[in-house]
Every structure is written in C-alpha cells, then in structure tokens.
Image (cartoon, rainbow, N blue to C red):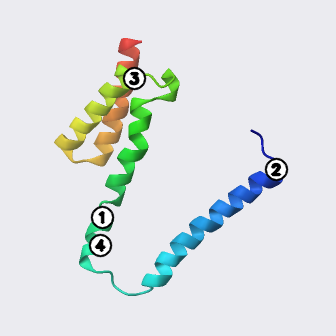
C-alpha cells in the first residue's frame, strides 16, 4: 500500500489535530480548578502503566530476531527489573540494563 504525498500530510495533520483537541478538551474542562485527590493519585501511575505496554512487545517479539524470543533481551529485562527493585534509582536502572544488554549480547553472540 502506498500513499500520495497529500494523503500522508492529511494523515499527519489529522492525527496532530486529533491529539491537540484531545488534550485541549481535558485541559479546557479542568481549567484552573484543583483536581480531586483520587484523580491525582491515579494520574501518578500513568507512566508506570504505559511504559510496560510499550516495552514488553519489544522484549518478547523483537524485530531484530524476526519476532522470536531472545535470551539476551530477556536477561537484560530481568536484570533491569532487579536493578530497579534493589536501587530504586532510574538512572542506575537505565544504565545497568543497557550494560547487561550489551554484555549479554557480546557474551552469547
């Protein structure tokens, strides 16, 4: 399936406009009012809920291996989770997970 330049720009502008209107509607409804505590409590977990949904498919079905399980990525994910629980430090978790990913890649392949 191929798109013309006009179709691509229409899609990009439409998605951008939809995204903007979605955010504007939320901010327009709330305005300068304070949010209830229960809403703030739930909003704190948004990133925690979204990140695993974005990362899990990349670990379980990596494009680099044509969608087959890869022990390197599984090991790095397990190490990253362990580092996160042990240190509670996002920077150490990111760099530790990356280091384990590269170390396992060079050790196994």
Q: Earlier in the sequence, mark 2 or mark 3?
A: 2
How far is disc 2 from disc 1 in space, using C-alphas? 40 Å
Helix, strand or loop for disc 2: helix
Q: Residue at x 47, y 76 (%)?
A: 26
Vertical relation: 24 (above or below) 62: below
Vertical relation: 16 (above or below) 89: below
* Proximity of marks 1 and 4: CB atoms separated by less than 8 Å: yes
Instruction: Identify residue for label 2.
Output: 5
Q: Where is residue 1 shown, x and y percent of the image?
A: 74, 38
Q: Residue at x 31, y 34 (%)?
A: 96
How far is disc 1 from disc 4 in space, using C-alphas? 6 Å
How far is disc 3 from disc 4 in space, using C-alphas? 38 Å
Q: Quadrant of the C terminus?
A: top left
Left or right, 85 with respect to 109, comes to left
Q: Earlier in the sequence, mark 3 or mark 4?
A: 4
Instruction: Identify residue for label 4.
Output: 40
Q: Earlier in the sequence, mark 4 or mark 2?
A: 2
How many C-alpha atoms fall within 10 Å of the one at disc 1: few (<14), some, or many (≥20)? few
How far is disc 2 from disc 3 in space, using C-alphas? 37 Å
Q: Where is residue 21 shown, x and y percent of the image?
A: 58, 72
How far is disc 3 from disc 1 in space, using C-alphas? 32 Å
How far is disc 4 from disc 2 in space, using C-alphas? 42 Å
In which quadrant of the rendered view does residue 32 lie? bottom left
Q: Residue at x 35, y 60 (%)?
A: 46
Instruction: Identify residue for label 1.
Output: 44
Helix, strand or loop for disc 3: loop
Instruction: Identify residue for label 3.
Output: 69
* Proximity of marks 2 and 3: CB atoms separated by less than 8 Å: no
């Amino acid at each position: 399936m191929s798109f013309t330049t006009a179709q691509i720009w229409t899609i990009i502008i439409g998605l951008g406009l939809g995204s903007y209107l979605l955010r504007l509607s939320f901010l327009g409804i709330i305005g300068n009012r304070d949010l209830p505590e229960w809403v703030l409590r739930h909003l704190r977990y948004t990133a925690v809920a979204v990140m695993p949904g974005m990362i899990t498919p990349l670990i379980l079905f990596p494009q680099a291996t044509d969608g087959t399980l890869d022990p390197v990525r599984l090991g790095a994910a397990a190490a990253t989770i362990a580092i996160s629980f042990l240190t509670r430090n996002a920077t150490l978790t990111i760099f530790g997970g990356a280091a384990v990913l590269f170390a396992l890649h060079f050790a196994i392949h």
